[in-house]
Image (cartoon, grey):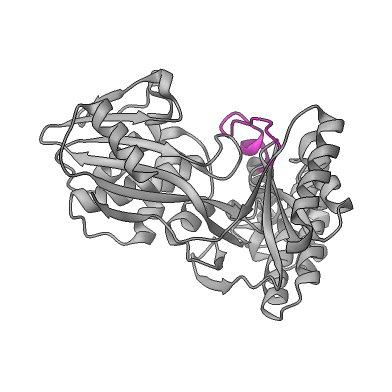
């Protein structure tokens, strides 16, 4: 595939010579949803599919970007002195935002580059195609401009670009999982402190199966920001009543039950209940995985989905239909929505001998209920964003 992408780069940019090839994965979160911006724990892993970039450094201040996922949009061009978020630049605003954020942080980026991008993550599926593109850009900037920057700083700047340049108030999980991913491991990340530990994923004859609802969702105009505001409001109420916390993730379930009566707004209480209980579930789930208790891990995944459905209200008809069909299928250890919600994907742990039947039965039930056709991916857990080589 890489050779085909290089040929396409040469054709699009009328170029012959050496190119550099980069890759940045997608990610899936196994448990710990909407906890990242609440200062809690998440448990994501990088996938073995993602975003490829074929790039060549230029001698002038021009950037030319072409995506094989948006062929009709042609080449997006901009210059170092005009790094502005423009609607007509659509997807190219993500790399542009990263470039500007690096410059604003004091890194010396003194020329442009040409790049051909090919993403193998379905857009709008909730597997972080945008964060994958941001980290791809970060790795290219480090390589081309010989920057003295480590991956965690690149993760932070990529998140900052999405928050401030794109205007999406995302937590740090997506960028962290994509940048710091490690083959056959998920990452238990404390989003408050950025302390993390790798946990080997040993599923004893089962695999992670991702199912895409194919219901498109745009994160920026979803109800994500509303949920975040509700949680922040709950923190404010607790602070006003002498509970000195910055994030809901600092509260144990026991402590939350003692103080939750201060939160009198019903919606804020439901949102806060999810944030606190999901955080506890995530820590427990990783412990169960370490003990080899996959059944208990799966049950916690199921409970996570119910909380996201009932307390956080971010699932919706399509995700619920897909998860319910998964719960009914033979060989399923656990299933839940993954990502921001309102469409996107589910993640299930399925016994290997049942995977083919699972895909068939869940797909059939889902289509009968929703009229949509789901796509399924048996996921392998891969490494983080990196350079693949020169060709």
Q: Is residue 89 left or right of residue 63?
A: right
Magenta includes 214? yes
Q: Is residue 283 above or below residue 242?
A: below
- Residues 277 and 292: in front is 292
- Residues 342 and 3: in front is 3
Where residue 150 appears, x then y in whole percent?
A: 31, 62
Q: Residue at x 20, y 26 (%)?
A: 14
Secondary structure predominantly adopted by residues drawn in magenta: loop
Where residue 60 appears, x then y in whole percent?
A: 11, 32
Q: Residue at x 78, y 40 (%)?
A: 363
Where residue 243 appears, x then y in whole percent?
A: 68, 62
Q: Residue at x 69, y 74 (%)?
A: 289
In the rendered image, the residue lying farthest to the bottom is 291
Residue 36 picture quarter:
bottom right
Q: Residue at x 35, y 58 (%)?
A: 153
Q: Is residue 70 above or below residue 364?
A: above
Q: Is residue 181 left or right of residue 388?
A: right
Question: Does the rendering let one see residue 174?
Answer: yes
First to last magenta residue range: 212-227
Question: Does the rendering let one see residue 269?
Answer: no
- Quadrant assignment for the N terminus: top left
In the rendered image, the residue lying farthest to the right is 328
Where residue 213 appears, x then y in whole percent?
A: 71, 37
- Residues 244 and 271: in front is 271
Residue 330 picture quarter:
bottom right
Q: Is residue 60 left or right of residue 87?
A: left
In the rendered image, the residue lying farthest to the left is 59
Magenta includes 48? no
Q: Is residue 302 left or right of residue 101?
A: right
Q: How many badges with numbers are in the image?
A: 0
């Amino acid at each position: 595939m890489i050779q085909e992408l290089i040929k396409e780069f040469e054709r699009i940019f009328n170029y012959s010579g050496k190119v550099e090839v980069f890759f940045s994965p997608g990610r899936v979160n196994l448990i710990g949803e909407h906890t990242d911006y609440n200062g809690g724990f998440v448990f994501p892993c990088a996938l073995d599919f993602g975003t490829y970039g074929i790039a060549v450094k230029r001698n002038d201040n021009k950037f030319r970007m072409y995506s094989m996922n948006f062929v009709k949009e042609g080449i997006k061009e901009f210059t170092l002195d005009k790094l502005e978020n423009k609607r007509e630049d659509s997807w190219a605003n993500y790399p542009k935002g990263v470039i500007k954020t690096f410059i604003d942080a004091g890194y010396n980026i003194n020329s442009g580059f040409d790049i051909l991008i090919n993403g193998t993550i379905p857009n709008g599926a909730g597997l972080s195609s945008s964060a994958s593109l941001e980290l791809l850009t970060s790795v290219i900037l480090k390589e081309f401009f010989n920057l003295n920057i480590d991956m965690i700083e690149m993760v932070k700047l990529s998140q900052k670009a999405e928050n401030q340049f794109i205007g999406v108030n995302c937590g740090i999980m997506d960028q962290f999982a994509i940048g710091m991913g490690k083959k056959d491991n998920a990452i238990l990340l404390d989003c408050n402190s950025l302390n993390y530990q790798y946990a080997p994923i040993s599923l004893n004859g089962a695999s992670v199966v991702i199912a895409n609802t194919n219901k498109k969702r745009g994160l920026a105009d979803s109800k994500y920001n509303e949920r975040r505001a509700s949680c922040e409001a709950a923190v404010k109420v607790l602070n006003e009543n002498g509970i000195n916390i910055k994030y809901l993730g600092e509260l144990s379930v026991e402590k939350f039950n003692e103080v939750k009566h201060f939160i009198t707004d019903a919606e804020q209480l439901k949102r806060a209940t999810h944030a606190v209980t999901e955080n506890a579930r995530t820590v427990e789930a990783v412990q169960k995985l370490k003990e080899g208790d996959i059944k208990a891990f799966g049950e916690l995944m199921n409970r996570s989905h119910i909380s996201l459905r009932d307390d956080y209200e971010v699932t919706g008809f399509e995700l619920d239909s897909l998860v319910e069909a998964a719960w009914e299928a033979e060989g399923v250890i656990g299933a839940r929505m993954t990502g921001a919600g309102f469409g996107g994907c589910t993640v299930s742990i399925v016994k290997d001998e049942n995977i083919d039947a699972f895909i068939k039965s869940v797909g059939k039930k889902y289509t009968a209920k929703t009229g949509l056709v789901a796509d399924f991916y048996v996921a392998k857990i891969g490494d983080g964003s990196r350079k693949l080589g020169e060709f």
